[in-house]
Image (cartoon, rainbow, N blue to C red):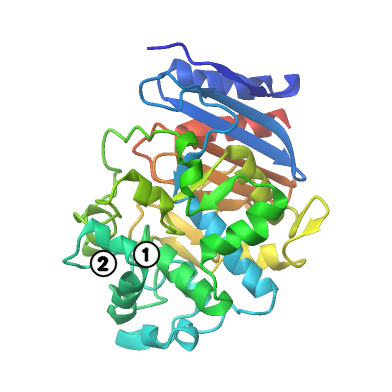
């Protein structure tokens, strides 16, 4: 195994963060990784190291893009919040008012906020279908609109690993007219200089990190029909058309690509009451409304007691995004995460290309975040 190269920005006061980052490699937990922390939108830590490819020939560098899987949901949730902040959407509007077909099979009363907080009972598709069918946006949305919920809507949360992106994305498209990934690029990532994408152009594919898959499926506890459809069918996630098609597609729940500093600065918008440096992205108070608890309790899909905002994982009771009860963000399958801490004006992100079997509480990111907070 080649010796990992570790570098980047890490002032002396954060020496323990660098030590934690190095320990992740020394314990053979990483292939390549990057961790960034921002204070009031300014990057104060940007550590990177290891390898962007499985053969360990290409260093994991400043331009390396990493697939972030479900951390993508934080991006999608911010884009929905932006529509709310502009007065073009309400969290309390029924989805069926925007998307009439969605009201079928007992879903007529489901609100945008309830849908974003995983209360819709649409956590997976029953099929039969092919993994390639996920690349047919209209076809997936038609299936979701016709689907009978797997539990009474608004009675409990049950994490929607892939379908969340189609639900949020279709709501966004019906209000804005553009796809969510297009709007992210045109309105946020481009103007603010953030290297993050939902729907990656072919021109960027060559700088993507290669992912080493996890050694096992996550521990979901006792398997139920909801968990089976969410994670365990042969078609539970998109596939079958090759890596380039996956990167190119816009699936706002699962296939974002980003650097850690870009994610940390994006989350700084939420940590800074809607502002990033001199730019106002959300009106004052909207970040608090987006992260406000919509439902809490044992999740029907994840093996955790969850507190959900409007698309965001709330740190309350979990402690995965530092010590703050008011912190929130999202984590991705295999280890990535991005979070905002409005109480301290902090935001951060961890990306990597060696996936673990953890769903939301990867020990690699936790030791980095805990070391950063200890240094503050």
Q: Residue furthest front?
A: 203
Tell me the SS state at disc 1: helix
Q: Is residue 323 above or below residue 185?
A: above
For image coordinates 51% across by 67% down, the residue present is: 179
Q: Residue furthest right?
A: 278
Q: Residue 115: percent from the left, percent from the top?
A: 45, 72
Tell me the SS state at disc 2: loop
Q: In terms of image quadrants, where is residue 236? A: bottom left
Q: In the visual, does 216 lie left or right of 306?
A: left
Image disc number at residue 49: none
Q: Residue 173: percent from the left, percent from the top?
A: 51, 73
Q: Residue furthest left?
A: 128
**Mark 2, residue position:** 125
Q: Is any atom of residue 326 visible in this view?
A: no
Image disc number at residue 163: 1
Q: In the visual, does 43 lie left or right of 323?
A: right
For image coordinates 68% across by 79% down, the residue present is: 87
For image coordinates 22% across by 53% down, the residue present is: 232
Q: Is residue 14 above or below residue 87?
A: above
């Amino acid at each position: 195994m080649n010796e990992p190269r570790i570098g980047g920005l890490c002032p002396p006061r954060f020496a323990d963060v660098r030590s934690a980052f190095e320990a992740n490699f020394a314990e053979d937990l990483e292939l390549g990784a990057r961790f960034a922390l921002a204070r009031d939108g300014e990057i104060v830590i940007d550590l990177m190291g290891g390898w962007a490819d499985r053969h360990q020939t290409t260093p994991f560098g400043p331009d390396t893009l990493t697939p972030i899987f479900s951390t993508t949901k934080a991006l999608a949730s911010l884009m929905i919040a932006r529509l709310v902040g502009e007065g073009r959407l309400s969290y309390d509007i029924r989805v069926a008012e925007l998307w009439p077909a969605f009201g079928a099979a007992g879903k007529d009363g489901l609100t945008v906020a309830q849908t974003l907080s995983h209360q819709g009972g649409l956590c997976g598709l029953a099929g039969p279908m092919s993994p390639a069918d996920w690349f047919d946006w209209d076809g997936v949305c038609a299936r979701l609109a016709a689907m009978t919920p797997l539990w009474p809507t608004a009675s409990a949360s049950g994490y929607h690993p892939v379908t969340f992106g189609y639900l949020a994305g279709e709501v966004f498209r019906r209000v804005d007219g553009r796809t969510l990934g297009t709007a992210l690029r045109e309105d946020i990532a481009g103007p603010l200089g953030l290297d993050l994408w939902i729907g990656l152009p072919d021109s960027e594919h060559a700088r993507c990190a290669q992912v080493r898959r996890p050694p096992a499926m996550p521990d979901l506890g006792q398997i139920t029909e909801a968990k089976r459809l969410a994670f365990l069918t042969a078609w539970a996630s998109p596939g079958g058309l090759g890596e380039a098609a996956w990167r190119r597609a816009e699936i706002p729940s699962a296939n974002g690509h980003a650097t850690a500093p870009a994610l940390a600065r994006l989350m700084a918008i939420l940590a800074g009451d809607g502002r990033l440096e001199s730019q106002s992205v959300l009106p004052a108070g909207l970040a608090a409304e987006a992260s406000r608890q919509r439902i809490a309790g044992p999740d029907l899909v994840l093996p955790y007691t969850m507190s959900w905002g409007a698309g965001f994982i709330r740190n309350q009771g979990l402690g995965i995004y530092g010590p703050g009860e008011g912190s929130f963000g999202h984590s991705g399958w295999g280890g990535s995460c991005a979070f905002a801490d409005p109480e301290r004006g902090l935001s951060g992100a961890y990306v990597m290309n060696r996936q673990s079997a953890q769903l939301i509480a990867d020990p690699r990111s936790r030791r980095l975040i805990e070391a950063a907070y200890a240094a503050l």
